[in-house]
Amino acid sequence: MYRLLFSQVLRRLDAEAVHHATVRALALLSTLPLLKRLLHRALAPSDPALRVTAFGVHFPGPLGLAAGFDKDAACAEALSAFGFGHVEVGTITAHAQPGNPRPRLFRDVRRRAVINRMGFNNAGAQAAARRLRRTRGVPVVVGVNIGKTKVVPESEATADYVTSAKELAPLADYLVVNVSSPNTPGLRNLQAVELLRPLLAAVKEVADSTPRRTPLLVKIAPDLADDDVDAVADLALELGLDGIIATNTTIRHSGETGGLSGRPLKERSIEVLRRLRARVGDRLTLVSVGGVEDVDDVWERLLAGATLVQGYTGMIYEGPLWASRIHRRLSRRLRRHATTVPELIGRTAPDRG
Ligand SMILES: Cc1cc2nc3c(=O)[nH]c(=O)nc-3n(C[C@H](O)[C@H](O)[C@H](O)COP(=O)(O)O)c2cc1C
């Protein structure tokens, strides 16, 4: 049904216009408690075999929505009702900003990919905090992904992230420092360990000071050299971070300027996951994202050592029931193998951590 709608209608419309219409519809749904609860009952993962706990937070299923879809924390509850085990909102910056000029979102249907150069368009940390404070009608695990405001120079990046962290860490189930989006000039330089150490240490101090101690993760690019992946992993261990999210979009492609996501990212995303697992074992929570399309991909990432898996582009091509369908299929497969998600994690990974 969705595939037909996509091939006949949606793919002919401007990708960003479709996106905003979807977010508006989901935000509206978020205000309709009865419908939201009915959807949640029908679509949210409920099989105990799917449950997984990471950094002290309980997730009803391993597949969550990656950052970038719900940039302003407008519809996390509705997304949870549609079957995502968690929703990572953002990237949110300390100050509101418009992002890059449009067009800035492009589908590559043949390759099942998307290129975006959105540039962290968002209403800022205070506006997101107001939304996150609203009471919730259905359970939802919310990760909050923070980034640097574009006009803030690199030398003041730490203070900018700290401003967002102070506003948002108390409202997040986990917090993510995003230093890997390709669309904010200079942002990815912050992945260099000498710049990343003071930044992460300062944000961690804020995250540690909330009443529940908010778990902190860092999100990295697929374009890091292997040695740099190792260096970030070592730094995350040294600072006592809770996990690493790998990966963001890649700039290694020949299309429109921007970050490429979807199927072409799959291979490198898995490679980075395996490298991280070999380096840190189970001492950090690994969240695998990039090119996840179906239950086979989720299965493979769990076996390779990911505790959680995320996707975004897969939903663009498969529609709103995507996460629910994958969780259902995963549940059936777990049953066939008489196992559970926690038992699956890292089964094929080398045990060096
Ligand atoms: C349109 C779009 C916007 C995105 N915006 C963000 C963002 O604001 N922050 C972020 O950390 N990642 C962002 N991402 C990257 C995704 O979170 C994810 O890491 C990447 O798309 C790979 O996953 P996928 O292949 O399942 O899409 C964005 C991706 C897309 C397609």
Image (spheres, helix red, strand yellow):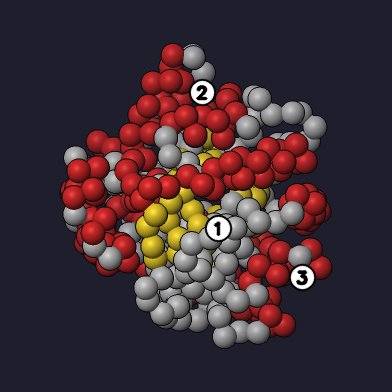
Residue 221's disc is: none
Instruction: Indicate yes or no: mark 3 CB to ligand 1 under 8 Å.
Output: no
Left or right, 143 with reference to 237:
left
Q: Earlier in the sequence, mark 3 or mark 1?
A: 3
Amino acid type, label 3 = Leu
Amino acid type, label 1 = His
**86 to 107, vertically: above or below:** above
| Disc 3 packing (10 Å; few <14; some 14–19; many ≥20) | some
- Specify the quadrant of the image occupied by residue 349: top right
**12 to 245, vertically: above or below:** below
Dot 2: element: loop
The percent coordinates of residue 97 (x first, y second) are 45, 81
Are discs 3 and 2 less than 8 Å apart at CB?
no
Q: Which mark is nearer the camera, 2 or 1?
A: 1
The percent coordinates of residue 326 (x first, y second) are 38, 34
Residue at which label 1 appears: 253
Residue 340's disc is: 2
Left or right, 316 with reference to 54:
left
Residue at which label 3 appears: 195
- Specify the quadrant of the image occupied by residue 114: bottom left
Are discs 3 and 1 less than 8 Å apart at CB?
no
